[in-house]
Image (spheres, rainbow, N blue to C red):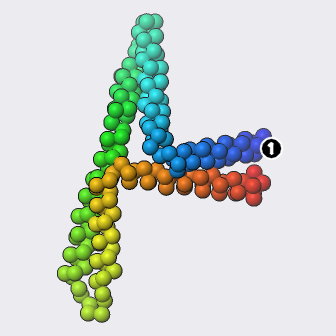
Amino acid sequence: MYSFINQIRNYIWLKSIAYIVFGLLFLFDPHDTLNIAINLIAAFFIVFGVINLISAWRQRRNNEVVDYSLAVGITQLIVAVIVFLLAEPLLSFLPFILGIVLIVTGISNVFTALNHRQYVNVSPMPFVLYGVLLILVGILLAFNPFGTILVLLQIFGATMVVMAIMEIITSWKLGI
């Protein structure tokens, strides 16, 4: 039981250190960290694709029944190429779509607030301001998509650092 607790303690510290390292990288250099993450994901698919292709080749060489290794290996290599080539354009296209959706929703909220006043003593102004805020955020997302992604990555990095600090404090307080 004591060794199990020690393993948990070690994993909490390792996870916290990883959170702090990656969090600080995302916080202070989100663009390069994003590129590194994309390359690591592509490398992951390449390594496992090659492993599956070697497995299929060995099965064929030993006259064994070839399972799905060949198809999985080829698919993983194709996914690696797609991730490597298209990850950044796809990431920058997503905020554009979200921005357009927010602009349309904001305009709809403003018109709804102004046109559907049911009660005389209820001001539509909070709903109008909410709609205008949605429109402004939508414009920001639509016309600066990659910059927005970088800000979101910085927020993600700060969150990871805070999570790591909280895990360290919790493990220290609980004596894990």
- The x and y percentages for residue 168 are 69, 53
Q: Residue, x 65% and y 45% (percent of image)?
A: 17
Q: Residue, x 44% and y 20% (percent of image)?
A: 50
Write down the residue under mark 1.
Answer: 2
Q: Residue, x 33% and y 74% (percent of image)?
A: 130
Residue 156 vertical placement versus 70 (above, below): below
Amino acid bearing label 1 = Tyr
Most foreground residue, 60 or 143: 143
Other-residue count near label 1 (Cα within 10 Å), few / some / many at <14 / 14–19 / ≥20: few
Q: Splitting the image into 4 quarters, where does residue 142 fall? A: bottom left
- The x and y percentages for residue 120 are 26, 93
Q: Is residue 157 visible?
A: yes
Q: Is residue 67 visible?
A: no
- The x and y percentages for residue 30 are 47, 46
Residue 81 vertical placement versus 91 (above, below): above
Most foreground residue, 63 or 72: 72
- The x and y percentages for residue 22 are 56, 44
Query: Is 10 on the left or on the right of 158, as rendered?
Result: right
Query: Is 131 on the left or on the right of 166, as rendered?
Result: left
Residue 122 vertical placement versus 91 (above, below): below
Most foreground residue, 37 or 78: 37
Query: Is 95 on the left or on the right of 114, as rendered?
Result: right
Q: Splitting the image into 4 quarters, where does residue 113 fall? A: bottom left
Residue 94 vertical placement versus 68 (above, below): below
